[in-house]
Image (cartoon, rainbow, N blue to C red):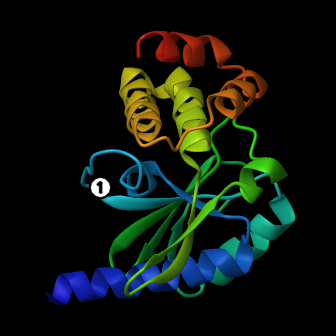
Amino acid sequence: MATEYRFYSALRLAVRLVKKWFPEYALIGRFARNFYAPPETTLDVDFLVNLDDHERLAEFLEYASARFQVSPMDIGHWQYKLYIKSFRFDLVKPKGYNYDPEVVARRRHVKIGQIGEVAILSPEDLAVLYLVSSLDRGVKDLVKAKDIVAYSKARGDFNEEYFLRKSEENKVKHLALTLLSKM
C-alpha cells in the first residue's frame, strides 16, 4: 500500500512538472497502450514531449535537476530519465517521429483517480509511434502497434485513413500497410 501511494504521488508530481514545461505532452508507452490493448506491466511512465525546443528543454533540465534526479543533463538526446521518489519517468521524442499540432490536438484526455486528468496519444498516433520506433528497436514494437490497431478496430475506435496518412508522413506507410493486411 505504501509503494502504491508513493507511485501515485510521484506520478502526480511528474504529470504536473511535465504539463508545466511541455503542455503539449502525451503519455505513451505501455502506460498509454493499456488504454487500447490488453494491459501489460511497466517499470516506467513515458511522456512524449517536444525535445526539439532546446531552449525550453534547457530550462526544464535546470529546474527539474534542482529538485529531482535527471539524466542526461546535456541537450540533444531523444530520451531523458527523471526519477521522482525512486520511480522513473521518461521524457522522449523518438528520432524520425513527427509530433505535430494535429497529433497534439487528437490526444485523449482521461481522468485517473488519484492523478487527475492526463493526456494520452490517440490509438492511431500511438500505433504510428510504435512503427517509427520499430525501425530502431525491432519486432517488439511492431507487435505493440498491431495490438493497438487490432483492439481499437474491434471497438470501432480507429481511423484507418488518418493512421495511413500519419504513417506516410512518418515514412512507415509500408509497415502500416503490411500490418493492416494481416488483420
Horizontal arrangement in the rendering, residue 175 relative to residue 76 (left or right): left
Q: Residue at x 81, y 69 (%)?
A: 56
Q: In the picture shown, does residue 145 fall above or below 123? A: above
Q: In the picture shown, does residue 5 fall above or below 89? A: below
Q: Residue at x 66, y 64 (%)?
A: 25
Q: Residue at x 43, y 38 (%)?
A: 148
For the residue carrying disc 1, how many other residues have a C-alpha within 10 Å: few (<14), some (14-19), or many (20+)?
A: few
Where, quadrant-wise, is the N terminus in this rendering? bottom left
> Which residue, given by chain and number where applicable, does mark 1 sit on?
42
Residue 45 percent location from the top left of the image: 42, 62
Quarter of the image holding residue 129?
Answer: top right
Q: In the picture shown, does residue 180 fall above or below 153? A: above
Residue 12 percent location from the top left of the image: 46, 84
Horizontal arrangement in the rendering, residue 180 relative to residue 65 (left or right): left
Nearest the viewer among 17 and 99 is: 99
Residue 136 percent location from the top left of the image: 52, 25
Instruction: Count the marks.
Output: 1
Inspect this view and state whether residue 68 appears. Answer: no
Q: Secondary structure at mark 1?
A: loop
